[in-house]
Every structure is written in C-alpha cells, then in structure tokens.
Amino acid sequence: MADPADISRRIGEFFEAEFPRSDAVLTDTTDLLRDWLVDSAGIVSTTLFLESEFGIQMRRADINAVHFQSIRSLTAYVVGRLANPRGK
C-alpha cells in the first residue's frame, strides 16, 4: 500500500527542485497554480514526474486544476490511482 506521507514528501521535493522559490514556503496546501506559479509547462513536467516516479498513467481528463491545486490534492490523486489503476 502506498504511504501518503512518503508520496507527499516526494512530490514536495520535486516542486522545490523543479520550481524553486526563495520568496515563499511550500506546504501541502499551497495553491500550486496561483501561489507557486506553476504554468502549463510545469503541469506537463509534473505529469511526467508523477507517471515515472509512481508508475501511474494520468488520463487527460485528470490533468486539471482540481488535481493540480496542491501537494495534498496531487497526493490524494496518486494514492487513488495506485489503489485503483484502472478505475476512475
């Protein structure tokens, strides 16, 4: 079973490495699109990271503002995909 705390930590480390910000603190609830300024290229990069890091396939419909809102929402998405890879 996937450990949500580990998944969250790994996603957070990815964002801090790929999209460094010295003027803000990244938390599990930081709005990635509004406050961390992740743009469309960043969403593509994050999608590729999630797929390779966690061995999941993101469906096009799942690449949206709801899932990409925060580390918490991305973690929940990854945990769900790992628990039910074929399900919705």
Image: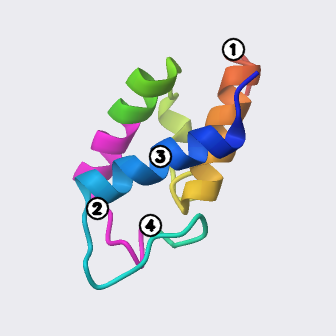
Q: CA distance from mark 4 to mark 1?
A: 27 Å
Magenta span contains residue 54: no
Compared with residue 31, is residue 53 higher up or lower down, i.e. above or below? above
Q: Earlier in the sequence, mark 4 or mark 3?
A: 3
Q: Is residue 9 left or right of residue 20?
A: right
Mark positioned earlier in the residue sequence (4 or 1) = 4
The secondary structure type at the circle numbered 3 is helix
**Mark 2 residue type:** Asp
Earlier along the polypeptide chain: callout 2 or callout 1? 2
Dot 4 amino acid type: Leu
Q: Label 1 belongs to which residue? A: 86
Inter-mark Cα distance, 2 to 3: 16 Å
Image disc number at residue 11: 3
The residue at 53%/21% (across/down) is 56
Q: Which residue corresponds to mark 4? A: 32
Residues drawn in magenta? 33-47
Which residue lies under the disc numbered 2? 39
Whole-number angstrom distance, CA of label 3 to CA of label 1: 22 Å
Labels 2, 3: front one: 3
CA–CA distance between discs 2 and 1? 28 Å
Q: Is residue 2 above or below residue 32?
A: above
N-terminal-most mark, 3 or 1: 3
Pick whichever of labels 2 and 4 is earlier in the sequence: 4
